[in-house]
């Protein structure tokens, strides 16, 4: 008799444990599922190919490792589910380190960082080309919006909150 009770207890315990494990698994799968939505960042080389196949608006952001507001945009604006949806649905998104030393082939030209070794914070040619302002020093973060024909429609040289990003992306 004691053996039967012991077997029933073990079976009950196993069922309880499996139920708890299933609940924990479901809870964590929902959390990670929400976190898996990310912006589909592409490189300038991929952008060149993508634009030739299907013209679409372009969202470009320039950052640097030392830029506090760039990191804040990464943590807030670029993690916002509405911002992610708006960008992924309507834009090609490019994120580039403004101080990159890589050569980038884009629209049949090679762009590089000509300031390496000459300046403490050297800026890449592409960043300077797209995000420079007349008589104003280069600043980060820099966000550039281009239309389907690759014409600049907007440029922002500041931290953009999730709400501001949503507003900008809806207006464009």
Image (cartoon, rainbow, N blue to C red):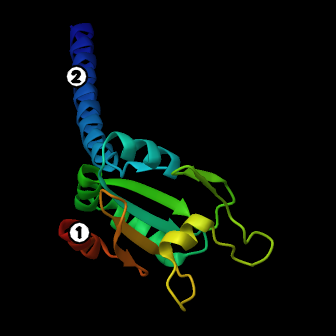
Q: Are marks 2 and 1 in contact (CB under 8 Å)?
A: no
- The answer to whether any part of residue 56 appears in the image is yes
- The answer to whether any part of residue 76 appears in the image is no
Q: Earlier in the sequence, mark 2 or mark 1?
A: 2
Identify the residue under disc 1. 166
Which residue corresponds to the image point at 74% horizontal and 78% vertical from the top-left? Answer: 120
Residue with the most extreme front position: 108
> Residue 11 at x, y = what percent?
24, 16
**Closer to us: 27 or 9:** 27
Which residue corresponds to the image point at 21% horizontal and 21% vertical from the top-left? Answer: 12
Figure disc tally: 2
Secondary structure found at label 2? helix
Secondary structure found at label 1? helix
Q: Nearer the viewer, mark 2 or mark 1?
A: 1
> Residue 29 at x, y = what percent?
29, 39
**Label 2 crowd (10 A; few <14 / some 14-19 / many >=20):** few
Taking the image as shown, residue 4 lies to the left or right of residue 35, namely: left
**Closer to us: 80 or 64:** 64
> Residue 136 at x, y = what percent?
53, 90
Identify the residue under disc 2. 15
Residue with the most extreme bottom position: 135
Quadrant, the N terminus:
top left
């Amino acid at each position: 008799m004691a053996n039967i009770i012991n077997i029933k207890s073990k079976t009950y315990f196993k069922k309880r444990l499996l139920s708890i494990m299933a609940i924990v698994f479901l809870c964590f799968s929902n959390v990670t599922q929400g976190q898996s939505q990310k912006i589909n960042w592409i490189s300038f080389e991929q952008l060149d190919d993508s634009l030739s196949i299907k013209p679409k608006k372009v969202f470009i952001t320039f950052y640097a490792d030392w830029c506090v507001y760039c990191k804040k945009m990464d943590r807030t604006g670029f993690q916002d589910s509405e911002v992610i949806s708006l960008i992924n649905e309507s834009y090609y998104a490019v994120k580039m380190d403004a101080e990159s030393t890589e050569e980038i082939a884009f629209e049949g030209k090679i762009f590089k960082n000509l300031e390496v070794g000459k300046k403490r914070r050297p800026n890449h040619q592409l960043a300077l080309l797209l995000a420079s302002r007349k008589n104003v020093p280069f600043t980060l973060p820099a966000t550039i919006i281009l239309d389907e024909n690759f014409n600049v429609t907007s440029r922002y040289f500041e931290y953009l909150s999730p709400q501001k990003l949503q507003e900008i992306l809806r207006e464009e």
